[in-house]
Image (tube, rainbow, N blue to C red):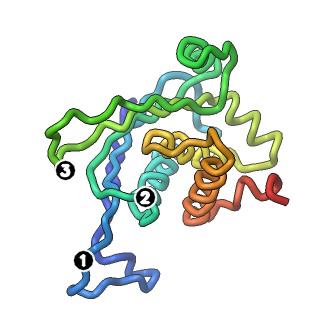
């Protein structure tokens, strides 16, 4: 099943939160993100309504004023298994073991591409067994862990990394802020205490 979840930012803010904009103000520049769900392997029902989880992530990324640039973008979210992720991890990273999430950014957009043309960000691949094992080991609801790792993978596609302590701090702070907007507690709280 392939599902396209398009979550463009809605100008004017969220009336329910009292965050309306006056008609005279320019809406802030925001990422317009469409995510395509690709069912590769595994029974993902333990996470609840996966399409809703993906749509929630697309929404908070579209609303994130911390992310620079206002352009339409697409990415694929592959729901996969440890075996498939292990093969990918070995082939592309030289690590012959499964991992929770892999991100495969698309090469730079071709020159001359207009701002109205969607940019293909790349693919995020999630491994079901690792996600469930990690959620159980840390006592985190599987749906929360799913959304955290999806945000983490998508931030990699946008250009964030955690190779240095400064990059890691910046990326973790952004992940924590985005997750809070989904009602998910700071997944790094124990590491910071």
Do the CB atoms of the residues marked 3 and 2 lie less than 8 Å apart?
Answer: no
> Residue 91: percent from the left, percent from the top?
55, 12
For numbered disc 2, what is the local secondary structure? loop
Which residue lies most toward the right here?
Answer: 193
Q: Residue at x 61, y 64 (%)?
A: 180
The quadrant in which residue 109 appears is top left
Quadrant containing the C terminus is: bottom right
> Residue 66: percent from the left, percent from the top?
46, 63
Residue to which mark 3 is pinned: 115
Do the CB atoms of the residues marked 1 and 2 lie less than 8 Å apart?
Answer: no
Q: What numbered label is drawn on residue 67?
A: 2
Q: Nearer the viewer, residue 192 or 33?
A: 192
Could you tell me how far apart the alpha carbons at marks 3 and 1 are, in whole angstroms? 18 Å
For numbered disc 3, what is the local secondary structure? loop
Q: Nearer the viewer, residue 103 or 76?
A: 103
Q: What numbered label is drawn on residue 109?
A: none
Q: Residue at x 53, y 40 (%)?
A: 153
The quadrant in which residue 135 appears is top right
Marked residue nearer the N-terminal end (1 or 2): 1
Marked residue nearer the N-terminal end (3 or 1): 1
Q: Nearer the viewer, residue 58 or 172?
A: 172
Residue to which mark 1 is pinned: 26
Q: Nearer the viewer, residue 1 or 190?
A: 190
Q: Residues within 10 Å of mark 1 (few under 14, many from 20)?
A: few
Residue 147 placement, left or right of 119: right
> Residue 55: percent from the left, percent from the top?
43, 51
């Amino acid at each position: 099943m392939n599902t396209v979840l398009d979550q463009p930012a809605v100008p004017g803010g969220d009336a329910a939160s009292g965050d309306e904009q006056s008609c005279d103000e320019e809406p802030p520049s925001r990422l317009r993100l469409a995510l395509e769900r690709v069912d590769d392997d595994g029974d993902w029902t333990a996470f609840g309504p996966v399409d809703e989880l993906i749509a929630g992530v697309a929404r908070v990324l579209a609303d994130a004023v911390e992310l620079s640039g206002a352009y339409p973008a697409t990415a694929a979210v592959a729901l996969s298994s440890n075996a498939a992720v292990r093969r990918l991890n070995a082939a592309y990273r030289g690590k012959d073991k499964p991992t929770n999430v892999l991100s495969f950014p698309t090469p730079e957009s071709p020159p001359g591409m207009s701002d109205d043309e969607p940019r293909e960000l790349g693919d995020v691949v999630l491994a079901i067994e690792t996600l469930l094992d990690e959620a159980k080991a840390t006592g985190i609801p599987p749906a929360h862990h799913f959304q955290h790792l999806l945000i983490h993978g998508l931030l990699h596609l946008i250009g964030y990394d955690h190779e240095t302590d400064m990059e890691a701090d910046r990326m973790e702070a952004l992940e924590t802020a985005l997750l809070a907007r989904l009602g998910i507690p700071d997944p790094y709280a124990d590491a910071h205490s």
